[in-house]
Image (cartoon, rainbow, N blue to C red):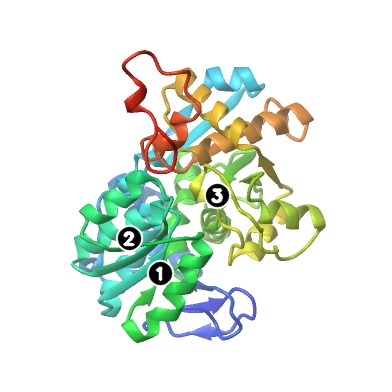
Amino acid sequence: MTHLECSLCSRKFEPAKPWNLCECGAPLLVRYDLAALRENWSLDSFLSAPNNMWRYAPVLPVRHESSIITLGEGMTPLLEARRTGDRIGANDLLIKDEGLNPTGSFKARGMACAVSMCVELGLKKLATPSAGNAASALAAYAAAAGLEAHIFMPRDVPQANFVECKAYGAHVTLVDGLISDCGRIVAERGPREGWFDLSTLKEPYRIEGKKTMGYEVAEQLGWELPDAIFYPTGGGVGLIGMWKAFAEMEALGWIGPERPKMIAVQSEGCQPVVRAFNEGAERSRFWDGASTLAAGLRVPKPLGDFLVLQAVRESGGTAIAVPDSEILDAGLRLASEEGIFASPEGGACVAAAARLLESGFLDRDDQIVIYNTGSGLKYLEAWSTRLPRAAAGETDKLGGLITPR
């Protein structure tokens, strides 16, 4: 790591201090001496590297191994989905199953890196707003590091996330509103409470952990990239991170200039990025009345929307929204066809892939990678709304916190 750089105005910042946003309001990105790394880091090193995301430590910001807080995140499987592929018209459909990370979602990658940097920088009190999975991940990694975690979640957050955070010992506040309302509380109270704000893209390190999804998919495909990547886009940090990873890998000489079509997937009930893409806008507008059972997609105004839109357009990709009914149906079909119990966000990508294959945007011979960002076990309330009518004696097993029994 050489410095931090504003993603909008390119102002540079010292890396050894805690930073949130640039003065212009844009997120900061970590930069590395990739030319030096190219001379000293070869693909042969992976033969003895740890089997987790820290195998990419030279392009992660943590400088001291003693600062690393890990629960074994990363190196999730890339699974063939032949039956689902046959049904939707894809000959080479792969699922990158992030639900097998610690705390059951891809958020573990970002929080592992961010909390490790907080340890390195001497920060003691951390805070974040969350639609669910980021809260669970922060609570877990803060517990592992012995740090305070202050979490603000919408009151109708999936029950699993709430219970997890309480079990990890985090300070949890339920808010009557959306993640944007939770974010305002963190921003208002943080300075006087001494919290470091770990909100999505309001610090530079969560994106570094999430970009390892890009390194991994390249490594798992023999340092080749697929033709298309479907990514469920709430805050969009994973998509932004992968786009950054591809540029870094090209600078390292590991891949060429070809890129996959990056496809941002949202719910019809909350689609600010899709609307901005269709309008040709550089930024999104706040999505009023955001509503979807895919909790991770209920982000009415992503901070990094301009970075998501840039990656989608530069890659020749697209942004697409699908209704909750298709999201849930596609997720249940994936479970019954492949044995992969995905999050609704993963189901959204399956539904989106089916639409884009049918429209001809993608060819059936394209290699397609879908990112399932979490375990279906964390969304039992949502899945229970789409299951067949309960048999006698089963009624009390369906429903819960956000859906009626």
Say the numbered circle drawn on residue 138: 2
Q: Nearer the viewer, residue 347 or 11?
A: 347
In percent of the image, x 35 and y 39: which residue is there?
A: 100
- Three-letter residue code for mark 3: Leu
* Quadrant in which the C terminus is drawn: top left
Categorize mark 1 by other alpha carbons within 10 Å: few (<14), some (14-19), many (20+).
many
The residue that label 1 is drawn on is 198
Categorize mark 2 by other alpha carbons within 10 Å: few (<14), some (14-19), many (20+).
many
Q: Nearer the viewer, residue 258 or 397?
A: 397
**Discs 2, 1 touching: Cβ within 8 Å:** yes
- Three-letter residue code for mark 2: Leu
In percent of the image, x 33 and y 44: which residue is there?
A: 160
- Three-letter residue code for mark 1: Leu
The residue that label 3 is drawn on is 297
The Cα atoms of the two marked residues, 3 and 1, are separated by 18 Å
The Cα atoms of the two marked residues, 2 and 1, are separated by 9 Å
